[in-house]
Image (tube, grey):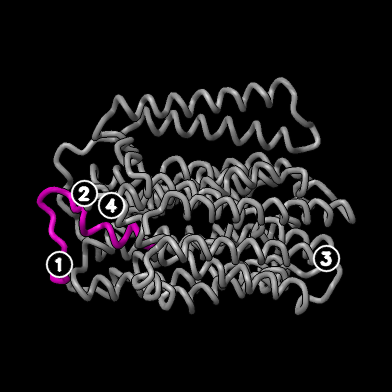
């Protein structure tokens, strides 16, 4: 998935950070003599996850040919990253509260760098997937803490300005990522898309150790290890079962057992969180709010549909229409550009209209874009791909900013951090499950690939319409 569409979810974490400061901590511009360097450090750290979340999609065809990987393995190259990021994002934020945000940030960036080196040097698809899993763990540690640091080192107008700069740079990274990744694949090979993380990580670690302050740790903060482990194993079993079931192997007793085990473990996760009470990674009391439940169901469906398209579209353009990796990356450019340009305007408009109308209209527009994407394949980019991408981008721009505001207002201030973090994890989990369902598409060739893509686009349109129905039914006006 491209990182750019996640900006709305991730920005909510930064906005909520000041409301969830650890005991004894204060947010102040005087906390550091180098506010610009602090901002640069958080941007560098976050950019690792943003760029890596978008560049790999355009490299999948080259990776598949180089490592002789089938569609199921290619799905895991994406989901190996999304799985731990979805399951451990909240735990990463809690770890920062417990052990210090700078310490966990540096740990996450270091793990991400080591995993990137493993991915770049991987001689087999299995080791590449292992590296991607480690990257996802590192991203789950660095993402919430880079944003929490941003929220706690600034206050008032300075905080709003810093968050705005972070969001703009993140959107730019989402725009440049596929283009840069495609160029690297074409010029030097797919391994370069992982090597590029190493200098960024080194710079982020140096700046963090040199310029970020050690915050006072939260008294009594606990880590919900049992909840995180249950969620991770449950999501992993579900993902593996769905990937195998939708690949050439089809549904058999092993994949069926994995899916059943995953469902049981996710139900057990709810039980574990209920017993954990206020110390749970995901307090179940949040779901007493119908708006919060509806927002997250809508997020899961909308971002799941979008993630499927952003995975399959460059694959189809490269394999069927014979685009270069650079051209396929450039084909995605309208999405982050339009979202970046239009989101602030839509945010102001949503403030006047309320979140319900834009969060219903946005997914409907996205669904229209998915229907337009069924014309992709064999035609001109300007008359097939571009119109579909523009319509999808406009729909997402309508929805992204109101989603941030609605998530934060659906719960009390004391739970804003965990609510926004969970919403970000849900967005990625949507991509996780849709990617698991796309193994057959990634395994197809020629006309069969195009037919499978069109079926997937239609399914994405239906899913986007379902997300609009969720918004209209459960989100308060």
Mark 2 and mark 3 in contact (Cβ < 8 Å)?
no
Say the numbered circle drawn on residue 414: 2
Whichever of callouts 3 and 2 sits on the residue coming sooner in the sequence is: 3
Range covered by the magenta-colored residues: 11-30
Mark yes or no: residue 330 visible.
Answer: yes
Whether residue 110 can be seen here: no
Q: CA distance from mark 2 to mark 1?
A: 19 Å
Q: Position of residue 8 (x, y in %)?
A: 43, 63
Horizontal and vertical percent position of residue 282? 34, 38
Q: Nearer the viewer, residue 166 or 250?
A: 250
Q: Which residue is mark 4?
A: 416
Q: Quadrant of the C terminus?
A: bottom left
* Kind of element beneath mark 3: loop
Q: Are marks 4 and 2 in contact (CB under 8 Å)?
A: yes
Q: Marks 1 and 4, Cα distance to the nearest angstrom?
A: 20 Å
Q: Earlier in the sequence, mark 3 or mark 1?
A: 1
Q: Is residue 420 magenta?
A: no
Q: Quadrant of residue 327?
A: bottom right
Check disc 1 and report the residue beneath it: 28
Q: Residue at x 48, y 46 (%)?
A: 297
What residue is shown with label 3? 377
> Vertically, is 388 above or below 63?
below
Q: Are there few (<14), some (14-19), or many (20+) residues within 10 Å of tag 1?
A: some
Residue in view at x 40 percent, y 59 percent = 10
Measured as percent of width and height from the top left, residue 268 is found at 44, 24
């Amino acid at each position: 998935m491209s990182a750019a569409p996640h900006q709305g979810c991730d920005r909510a974490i930064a906005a909520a950070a000041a409301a969830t400061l650890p005991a004894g901590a204060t947010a102040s511009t005087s906390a550091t003599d180098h506010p610009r360097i602090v901002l640069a450090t958080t941007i560098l750290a976050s950019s690792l996850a943003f760029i890596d979340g978008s560049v790999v999609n355009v490299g999948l065809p080259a990776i598949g040919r180089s490592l002789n990987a089938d569609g199921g393995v290619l799905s895991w190259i994406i989901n190996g990253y999304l799985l731990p990021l979805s399951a451990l994002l909240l735990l990463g934020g809690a770890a920062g509260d417990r052990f210090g945000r700078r310490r966990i940030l540096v740990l996450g960036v270091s793990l991400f760098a080591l995993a990137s080196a493993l991915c770049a040097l991987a001689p087999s698809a299995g080791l590449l997937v292992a590296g991607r899993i480690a990257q996802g763990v590192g991203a789950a540690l660095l993402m919430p803490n880079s944003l929490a640091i941003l929220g706690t080192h600034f206050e008032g107008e300075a905080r709003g300005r810093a968050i705005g700069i972070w969001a703009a740079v993140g959107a730019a990274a989402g725009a440049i990522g596929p283009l840069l990744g495609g160029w690297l694949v074409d010029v030097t090979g797919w391994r370069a898309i992982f090597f590029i993380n190493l200098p960024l990580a080194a710079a982020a670690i140096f700046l963090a150790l040199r310029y970020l302050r050690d915050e006072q740790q939260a008294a009594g903060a606990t880590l919900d290890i049992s909840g995180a482990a249950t969620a991770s194993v449950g999501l992993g079993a579900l993902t593996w079962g769905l990937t195998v079931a939708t690949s050439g192997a089809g549904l058999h007793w092993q994949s069926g057992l994995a899916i059943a085990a995953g469902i049981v473990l996710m139900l057990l996760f709810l039980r574990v969180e209920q017993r954990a009470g206020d110390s749970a990674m995901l307090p179940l009391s949040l779901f007493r709010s119908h708006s919060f439940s509806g927002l997250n169901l809508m997020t899961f469906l909308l971002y799941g549909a979008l993630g499927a398209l952003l995975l399959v579209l460059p694959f189809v353009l490269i394999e069927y229409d014979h685009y270069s990796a650079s051209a396929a990356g450039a084909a995605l450019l309208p999405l982050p550009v339009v979202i970046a340009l239009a989101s602030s305007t839509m945010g102001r408009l949503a403030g006047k209209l309320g979140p319900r109308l834009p969060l219903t209209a946005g997914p409907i527009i996205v669904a229209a874009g998915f229907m337009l994407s069924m014309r992709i394949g064999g035609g001109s980019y300007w008359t097939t791909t571009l119109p579909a991408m523009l319509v999808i981008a406009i729909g997402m721009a309508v929805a992204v900013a109101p989603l941030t505001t609605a998530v934060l207002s659906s719960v009390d201030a004391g739970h804003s951090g965990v609510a926004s973090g969970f919403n970000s994890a849900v967005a990625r989990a949507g991509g996780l499950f849709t990617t698991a369902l796309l193994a057959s598409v990634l395994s197809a060739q020629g006309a069969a690939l195009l037919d499978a893509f069109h079926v997937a686009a239609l399914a994405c349109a239906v899913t986007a319409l379902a997300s609009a129905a969720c918004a209209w039914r459960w989100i308060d006006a």
